[in-house]
Image (cartoon, rainbow, N blue to C red):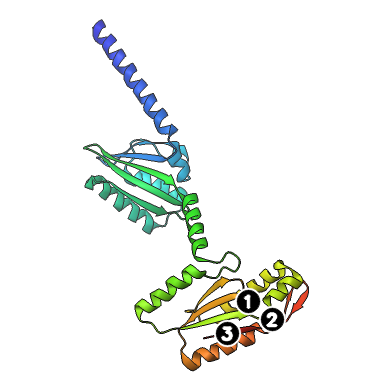
């Protein structure tokens, strides 16, 4: 009996040590983690997961069913009933299907989580969540810079070329309007590049407000602007004349009254 008791004590101590080690490993992770067993019950999770889903530690505990676990998450994340039902049905299918996958989840507050689901053979599934919001924002910013002029926000040469090639590939008729601001260099020389830059921003704003919504505007560089419009022939000419009138209106930039004008080729 004493031998059995000593053996039991050693096994219990080893298991407790393993449990402490597992908990320490889970809490050291930078990703949120959840383990759901094959019976659909929550077995393990870490505090990073709670942080990602704005859920207090006392709200969930090991042993909860998928429904009980998700009810707590939905309450603190303010999920509508439709989303709660959708996530619950999907998670139950993941446990039953025993397959892994990766996907991105767009959260209600605008954050983006990378979710990985991995099956543990005959035991359940492990899901990890990584906050990739900063990376996605940086990627979107880089993509925007690759296709837009940083000063005016208009398209650049690259986006103009790709848009033009797409229209040609589709067989869509279009007109190309090329605009050059008259005396722009003189404005820069007389008042400085700051005034010239603000004049370009003013021109971009005027064009955006004037042109049809399906038009495409790009700054080619300097004071050169290109526009792709669906109007053809006389309609394109009338649009160009309207642009001439709009861009010839006096404008005050940094207290200086400018009288801009432009030339347009079609």
Q: Which quarter of the rendering shows the N terminus?
A: top left
Q: Nearer the viewer, residue 220 or 202?
A: 220
Q: Which residue is mark 1?
A: 203
Identify residue for label 3.
Answer: 264
Looking at the image, is 265 positioned above or below residue 220? below
Between circles 3 and 1, the one closer to the viewer is: 3
Q: How many marks?
A: 3
- Look at 48% across and 42% down and name the residue there: 51
* Tags 2 and 1 touching, CB below 8 Å: yes
**Residue 221: x percent and y percent?**
58, 70
Write the residue at 58% across / 75% down: 224
At numbered mark 1, what does the secondary structure look like: helix, strand or loop?
A: helix
- Image coords of residue 183 (percent x, y): 69, 79
The Cα–Cα distance between marks 2 and 3, rounded to whole angstroms, is 14 Å
Q: Contact, CB < 8 Å: mark 2 with mark 3?
A: no
**Residue drawn at the location 40% of the way across and 44% of the way down:** 129
Residue at image point 68% right, 76% down: 184
Q: CA distance from mark 2 to mark 1?
A: 10 Å
**Res 61 quadrant in image:** top left
Question: Foreground: 169 or 128?
Answer: 169
The residue carrying mark 2 is 260
Left or right of residue 72, residue 179 in this image: right
- Classify residue 255 by image quadrant: bottom right
């Amino acid at each position: 009996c004493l031998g059995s008791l000593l053996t039991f004590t050693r096994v219990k101590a080893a298991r407790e040590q393993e449990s402490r080690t597992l908990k320490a490993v889970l809490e050291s992770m930078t990703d949120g983690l959840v383990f759901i067993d094959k019976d659909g019950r929550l077995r393990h999770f870490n505090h990073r997961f709670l942080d990602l889903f704005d859920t207090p530690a006392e709200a969930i505990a090991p042993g909860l069913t998928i429904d009980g676990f998700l009810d707590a998450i939905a309450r603190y994340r303010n999920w509508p009933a439709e989303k709660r039902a959708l996530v619950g049905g999907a998670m139950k299918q993941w446990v039953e299907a025993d397959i892994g996958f990766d996907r991105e989840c767009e959260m209600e507050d605008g954050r983006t989580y990378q979710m990985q689901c991995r099956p543990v053979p005959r035991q359940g599934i492990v899901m990890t969540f990584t906050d990739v919001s900063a990376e996605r924002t940086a990627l979107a910013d880089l993509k925007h810079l690759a296709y837009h002029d940083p000063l005016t926000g208009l398209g650049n040469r690259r986006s103009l070329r790709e848009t033009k090639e797409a229209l040609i590939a589709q067989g869509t008729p279009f007109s190309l309007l090329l605009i050059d601001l008259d005396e722009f260099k003189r404005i820069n020389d007389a008042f400085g590049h700051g005034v010239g830059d603000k004049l370009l921003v003013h021109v971009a704003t005027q064009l955006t407000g004037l042109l049809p919504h399906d038009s495409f505007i790009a700054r080619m560089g300097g004071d050169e602007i290109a526009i792709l419009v669906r109007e053809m022939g006389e309609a394109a000419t009338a649009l160009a004349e309207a642009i001439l009138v709009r861009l010839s209106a006096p404008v005050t930039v940094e207290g200086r009254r400018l009288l801009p004008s432009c030339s347009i080729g079609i």
